[in-house]
Amino acid sequence: MNTNGMTDRIAGVRAQLEAACRRAGREPGSVELVAVAKTFGPDAVREAAEAGLSVFGENRVQEAAEKIPLCPSGLRWHLVGHLQTNKVRHAVFLFDVVHAVDSARLLERVEREAEEAGKRMSVCLEINVSGERSKFGLAPEAAPEVLALAGSLRRVEVVGLMTIPPFAPDPEAARPFFRRLRELRDRWRDEFGLALDGLSMGMSGDFAVAIEEGATWVRIGSSIFGQRQGREWRHGQE
């Protein structure tokens, strides 16, 4: 992999991030860049870390379990993909933040596994703002029940909300969905007394719009690592 190319791509993403923050009257430090390394191996992660990144995302627990031990120490890892109940124990061990909890049952399972591991976990609730049947996430009307449960947990803190808008070539098409998530967050924060400071929204194609609408985490993959590999990374490929 071309290290200069990686450095240039990261610089370009940072420039877009900073420009979006200026337009929104925000400090660039209020947005954290999560470099989503799915299908790329430890060498790519190492190059991105050497270029200044420290927060990395993975979509699948199994791929992360093979990859993370081979990556530089001191990095922070976020699970940004769907979490299956039978993978929660491994996810609690591997990740600092889970972005896509989408049911009370899953939240309770994370609590149990975190208790057993003696660890505190930060999670976001995934909200299906668009209502697309093909997407995971809580319907907005189902979220209050889960948020009420969150206040009783000892080992898990719901730190924010996450969403994925419908795919569209025009980034502006995502704006109403990002805005809706922020509005829901503001309402639920008052209603349930939770901080909910995090808004995980925006990917390579639309993250500037997401920042303008209040994103605090943007999940960037191809704009950092380049074209995705055809399949998940497996140990021994590099």
Image (spheres, rainbow, N blue to C red):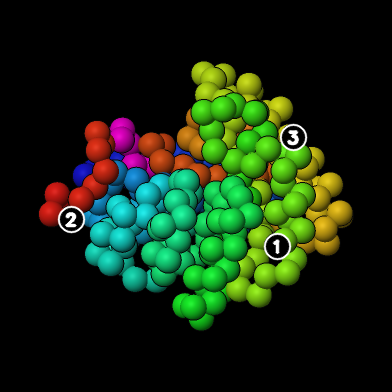
Q: Is residue 226 magenta?
A: yes
Residue shown at 52% from the left, 18% from the top: 169
* Foreground tag (1 vs 3): 1
> Which residue: 39% across, 64% down?
90
Amino acid on which the number 1 mark rests in the picture = Ala
Viewer-nearest residue: 112 or 97: 112
User: Which residue type does callout 3 highlight?
Assistant: Arg
Q: What amino acid is found at the position of numbered circle 2 in the picture?
A: His
Task: Point out the image quarter for the N terminus.
Answer: top left
Residue 207 in sight: no
Q: Residue under circle 2?
A: 235
Q: Is residue 43 left or right of residue 125?
A: left
The residue that label 1 is drawn on is: 150
Contact? badges 1 and 3 (CB < 8 Å): no
> Whole-Å distance between the Cαs marked 1 and 3?
21 Å
Q: CA distance from mark 1 to mark 2?
A: 37 Å
Q: Is residue 202 left or right of residue 13?
A: right
Range covered by the magenta-colored residues: 224-228
Q: Could you say whether the residue bearing mark 2 is in a helix, strand or loop?
A: loop
Asked if 154 appears above or below 183 in the picture, the reply is below
Q: Which residue is mark 3?
A: 180
Instruction: Classify residue 181 by image quadrant.
Output: top right
Q: Residue at x 74, y 35 (%)?
A: 180
Residue shown at the point (73%, 55%) measured from the top left: 147
Q: Position of residue 163 (x, y in %)?
A: 61, 40
Image height of 69 relative to 145, above or below? below
Residue furthest right in the image: 190
- Is residue 3 depicted above or below 12 in this figure? below
